[in-house]
Image: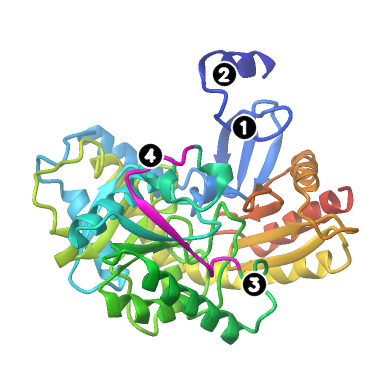
Amino acid sequence: MTDLYDRHRAVLPDWLALYYERPMELTHGEGRHVWGADGRKYLDFFGGILTTMTAHALPEVTKAVSEQAGRIIHSSTLYLNRPMVELAERIAALSGIPDARVFFTTSGTEANDAALLLATAHRRSNQILAMRNSYHGRSFTTVGITGNQSWSPTSLSPLQTLYVHGGVRGRGPYAELSDAEFTAACVADLRDMLGQSRGGVAALIAEPIQGVGGFTSPPDGLYAAFKEVLDEHGILWISDEVQTGWGRTGEHFWGWQAHAENGSPDILTFAKGIGNGMSVGGVVARAEVMNSLDANSISTFGGSPVTMAAGLANLAYLLEHDLQGNARRVGGLLIERLRAICAQLPVVREVRGRGLMIGIELIEPATGRPNPQAAAAVLEAAREGGLLIGKGGGHDTSVLRVAPPLSLTVAEAEEGAAILERALRSA
């Protein structure tokens, strides 16, 4: 492994992040487990950043990929593509967006980039509202709207971004308010900001649950209240569902459905889990918005026959096996188990999340300040115990991120919670 790490450092960028003091190579996986090059078996509670959504080496997806690769691997969008049309039909029907059109990309970054292009072209404005503590990708456009300095390496941007309160419930100037008061204060802040802006803002982009930001979220209904204000100004709502889509939150198929009182978003972006590890992303938008571009475009790799076949097989498996329901049931058990464990630990400030999207925020017990050192130590200890998790969280990376494949069993949830308890007690 040292040899591979040395080779990695010699040819790849210094800013390409690696987990662990001794970075690990994963060689294969099955179900909710992966194996390292050292031969050790690990329970996977991070799924390649919420991307292995159903299971490692899922036979249905593997078979679909193999069979499609045996027919044709690539064609581009210049030719009719049956798997792409079939997956677009299914996603359009599931999206909740009326008269929906779907455009496929290769990643969540590219999906958000395309959504910003659509919104700014449709509204003829380069002004974007984004949430504080947000993350939307690593392209030049998306880092320009990311409200998290740890993941935004430049202040240069083709967009003018205005940052809105509301994505973080437990910290900030409105943290002590009730949910209703919190929502009212954030709406008042939004109105005040729009009253001071140049006018003609293109869109609000928001993650229903902030992923890299540490699985933080507003009270249910906040974005519905925002939408009422946005609609008064003709501003579009982009829901970034790259991490929250496909039933991961358990209660809803899409994260925006916790904020559905005033209707669906105008644009929805997705990626990660739909391909179960294959490079699939995309945008769903009302036809009026999607068709507002007045220049030709294609995608060389978006909508690839192989990735579309994987997406179709994966989505079918997820729906047929009610993995959203499993995320609700097993995720509910897991979060309550973790809350019971962490209630006894002064290093834990909060356990939050929904379904199989759970964050554990760590602090310095004496000061209440974020504790990224403890988060790093728990990450290492969990690995030693045979469990892989992630981390994130605003400016300080002090939140443990727990997001297993949606087929997680009760026994695996209990096993992972026990390993995590030992790791937390060692912090």
Mark pair 1, 2: CA separation: 10 Å
Is 149 placed above or below 164 here?
A: above
Q: Secondary structure at mark 4?
A: helix
**Front tag of 4 and 1:** 4
For this view, does 211 lie left or right of residue 289? right
Looking at the image, do the residues carrying marks 4 and 1 touch, with CB atoms under 8 Å apart?
Answer: no
Looking at the image, do the residues carrying marks 3 and 1 touch, with CB atoms under 8 Å apart?
Answer: no
Residue 53: give x, y in percent of width and height. Answer: 49, 53
For this view, does 299 lie left or right of residue 354? left
What crowding class fits label 1: few (fewer than 14 Cα within 10 Å), some (14-19), or many (20 or more)?
few
Asked whether residue 85 is in view, the answer is yes
Mark pair 4, 1: CA separation: 22 Å
Q: Which mark is residue 18?
A: 1
What crowding class fits label 2: few (fewer than 14 Cα within 10 Å), some (14-19), or many (20 or more)?
few
Q: Which residue is mark 4?
A: 140
Q: Which residue is mark 2?
A: 8
Mark pair 4, 3: CA separation: 38 Å
Residue 404: give x, y in percent of width and height. Answer: 59, 54
Magenta highlight range? 154-168
**Residue 69 lies within the magenta run:** no
- For marks 4 and 1, the one nearer the N-term is 1
Circle 1: residue type:
Leu
The quarter holding residue 277 reads: top left
- For marks 1 and 2, the one nearer the N-term is 2
